[in-house]
Image: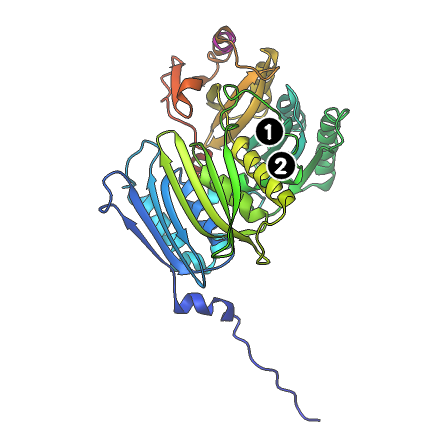
Amino acid sequence: MAKVYWPYFDPEYENLSTRINPPSVSIDNTSCKECTLVKVDSMNKPGILLEVVQVLTDLDLTITKAYISSDGGWFMDVFHVTDQQGNKVTDSKTIDYIEKVLGPKGHASASQNTWPGKRVGVHSLGDHTSIEIIARDRPGLLSEISAVLADLNFNVVAAEAWTHNRRIACVLYVNDNATSRAVDDPERLSAMEEQLNNVLRGCEQEDEKVARTSLSIGSTHVDRRLHQMLFADKDYEAVAKLDDSASPGLGAKITVEHCEEKGYSVISVSCEDRPKLMFDIVCTLTDMQYIVFHATISSKGPHASQEYFIRHKDGYTLDSEGEKERVIKCLEAAIHRRVSEGWSLELCAKDRVGLLSEVTRILREHGLSVTRAGVTTVGEQAVNVFYVRDASGNPVDVKTIEALRGEIGHSMMINVKNKVPSRRWKEESQGGSGGGWAKTSFFFGNLLEKLLP
């Protein structure tokens, strides 16, 4: 019998174009007096814009301007960025990281090179178990969830929770208190899941949507995963009509038009600027299967203007009114989810099982509802940030904040801040604890990164 010889395919063939034309990254601190220019040129591929924006925002860099072009097979971006203090990026470690991740070696395995502090899953954080929760929000829910975990001797080492349109999405990283290892006992995990679902079912009596708890073993970016969870839960439907003073960002103006000359749909977003605004919009468009071919981003003072030229991944534009309306609603939701105005509490204490349960119980006893939360552990210290309103969703009375400070301040360092409506997106400090903890803003990505080996 004659031998059959199959053609040989190089397993690296898919990366051939990248190896022939490797991406280039340049960090320019001379062309502009006010900001650093990050220029990225590479072969075009699906999701590349989100990858680049994700790297920059996870480093807590502010994108003040951006020019994106990816028609054809090449991707060319220019980002004007500053640090959180509005200064140029001069830190050598930050610059090296950008060049490494977005450069030739980083793009060869981009899925493994996202900013490590922002990924969901057991494998991404080492010996931790990831829990995802989606449910109808209500005052005290986070307290009940953390109490269940504490009773089962699960230690919460990191977590992030968003609320929007009466829904809550939460990702928690837990380990066993006795071993500081991930929990892999099926019976114990099953018991935890059952008890959490019992707590969540109490929220759904008047809601057709189903609450659920799940264990994650993937490596999705935390913020992207929260967007995905709320999007899948259709939190963009029936968005509550609130006063602009109660919730900034609800005044966002989004339009969808057709560019006949080039065959694009053009999405224009005009709203108040805030950190990670571009990431939230690009993330949503990507997860809705739209490709950004060109974009222009500009921030002037408190105002942001963004324009995206897009097509669906199948090549068609947004022609029907129903599809245009859905995109507008989804982008509005993406902008609002991260918005938190009013009082924020930054707490620092020695980590222990039940700490999150204790803090959230105290918040509940003072009639406070958590609208957004970030929890992480750095060494032996737990650093938590809670954005709070009262049980009715209104701003919290100053007397309540002072009473809370008095009760918590004796056992942990506390920093209280207030985002004043007339000065949106600019935090005004209202004093701190006598412990002298530095009054700096909390950035989940930077702190969580320190958990990694």
Find the distance from the CA under tag 2 to the CA under tag 1: 8 Å
Residue shown at 40% from the left, 51% from the top: 68
Q: Residues within 10 Å of mark 1 (few under 14, many from 20)?
A: many
In primary-sequence order, the first of circles 2 and 1 is 1
At which x and y percent is residue 233? 67, 37
Query: Quarter-wise, where is residue 152 in the image?
Result: top right
Q: With 300 as the anchor, is 190 left or right in this view?
A: right
| Quarter containing the N terminus | bottom right
On the question of residue 403 being in view, the answer is yes
Q: Secondary structure at mark 1?
A: strand
On the question of residue 115 being in view, the answer is no
Closer to the camera in the image, 100 or 283: 283
Q: Is 329 above or below relative to 1?
A: above
At which x and y percent is residue 278? 45, 40
Q: With 169 as the anchor, is 434 left or right in this view?
A: left
| Disc 1: which residue | 164
> Which circle marks residue 230 in the picture?
2
Do the residues bearing badges 2 and 1 touch, measured as CB atoms within 8 Å? yes
**Is 182 inside the magenta-drawn segment?**
no
User: Magenta segment range?
Assistant: 400-404
Disc 2 marks a residue whose amino acid type is Leu
At which x and y percent is residue 216? 63, 43
**Is 402 inside the magenta-drawn segment?**
yes
